[in-house]
Image (cartoon, rainbow, N blue to C red):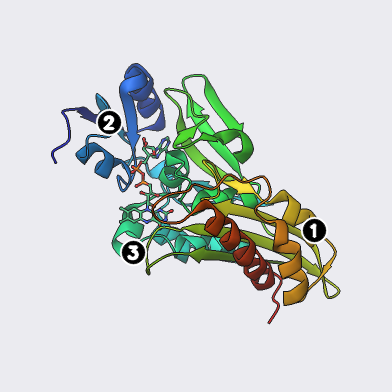
Amino acid sequence: MIPAQFDYVRPSSLGEAVQALSGGGDDAKVIAGGQSLLPLLRLRLAYPSLLVDIGGLGELAGVRDAGDGLVIGAMTTMYSLIRDPLVREHCGLIAATAATVADPAVRHRATIGGSIAHADPAGDLPAVIAALDATLVATGPGGQREIAPADFFVDYLTTALAPGEILTAIRVPKLGSGWGYRYEKFQPTAQAWAIVGVAALARRADGHVAEARIGLTNMGTIPVRARAAEAATAGAEASREALAAAAANADEGTDPPDDLRAAADYRRHLARVLTGRALAGAAGVR
Ligand SMILES: Cc1cc2nc3c(=O)[nH]c(=O)nc-3n(C[C@H](O)[C@H](O)[C@H](O)COP(=O)(O)OP(=O)(O)OC[C@H]3O[C@@H](n4cnc5c(N)ncnc54)[C@H](O)[C@@H]3O)c2cc1C
């Protein structure tokens, strides 16, 4: 279908983009890689009056070393994340997860900012951002502010971004020594969306897992942390059996969808099994 009519601007600075977006009111939308927004426009599920194309803002693309963390520009594509040496060295979970998103054609255009701002519960990067305790940086007419993932994801396809605000960067703490990671994605066919995904980080010390952080994809309307499983993992032996046992309550506090792709109970089962596997992978258990 052909999208409904809209105005289109392609600003050459962040200031101009914020001005255009806030001037367009509630009916204005940012377009980044267009991989989620364009299908919605074509299906007429979204009909903004103005599209602000941030594709020309080079300042929003790329990755910068900021000492104890990385600053990832919102316009950095999945393709770049997979290959970026800083991301691979310090936040390999992001690179590994981006490699599971869709297919090469989509990954060349889809951006990390778009994936997070779209807030699709089946999107892979939001759970990773939650597990990494990253910070979302937004710029709007009132200036810049930083938002924690727990406050950023509000509901299905809904974030804390105010009208006129643009997600400009993601600040990610560098993983220190001893930390490992794994993203486990259960998908019906290769390159498909996750039915359930689990992003796990584990810090191993003396044959045990000293600390773990776990983010769940598609186990509710927003990405959730599996806090009960995190607590059960702290101090657990680094063995497949012990980590599977620690993952037994990974679905606690979740509210998975019950839809044509999978029943809610099946998703709960997947969350437990995949969490055990992701923890074992993150802890380097063979
Ligand atoms: C065939 C196909 C398969 C896919 N499979 C997967 C998959 O397996 N896993 C997965 O995670 N994703 C998947 N995706 C989704 C893809 O990763 C997303 O489309 C992408 O991450 C969104 O990024 P984008 O840059 O294309 O955003 P756009 O489509 O341009 O924008 C998406 C939404 O975010 C808003 N937005 C974008 N950037 C910003 C910003 N910087 N600030 C404020 N608002 C912003 C837009 O206004 C819009 O509402 C798939 C997409 C396709 C087409």
Question: Residue 103 got which mark?
Answer: 3
Residue 204 spot, x, y in % from top left = 78, 69
Quarter of the image where one finds residue 245: bottom right
Could you say whether the residue bearing mark 3 is in a helix, strand or loop? Answer: loop
Residue that appears at 33% across and 45% down: 36
Q: Which residue is mark 2?
A: 51
Q: Which residue is mark 1?
A: 232
Q: CA distance from mark 2 to mark 3?
A: 25 Å
Q: Amino acid at mark 1?
A: Ala
* Badge nearest the viewer, 1 or 2: 1
The answer to whether 24 appears left or right of 208 in the picture is left
Q: Residues within 10 Å of mark 1 (few under 14, many from 20)?
A: some
Residue that appears at 25% across and 44% down: 39
Quarter of the image where one finds residue 92: bottom right
Queried on whether the Cβ of the residue with tag 3 lies below 8 angstroms from ligand 1, the answer reads yes
Q: Eyeballing the image, is 235 above or below 218?
A: below
Question: Residue 69 got which mark?
Answer: none
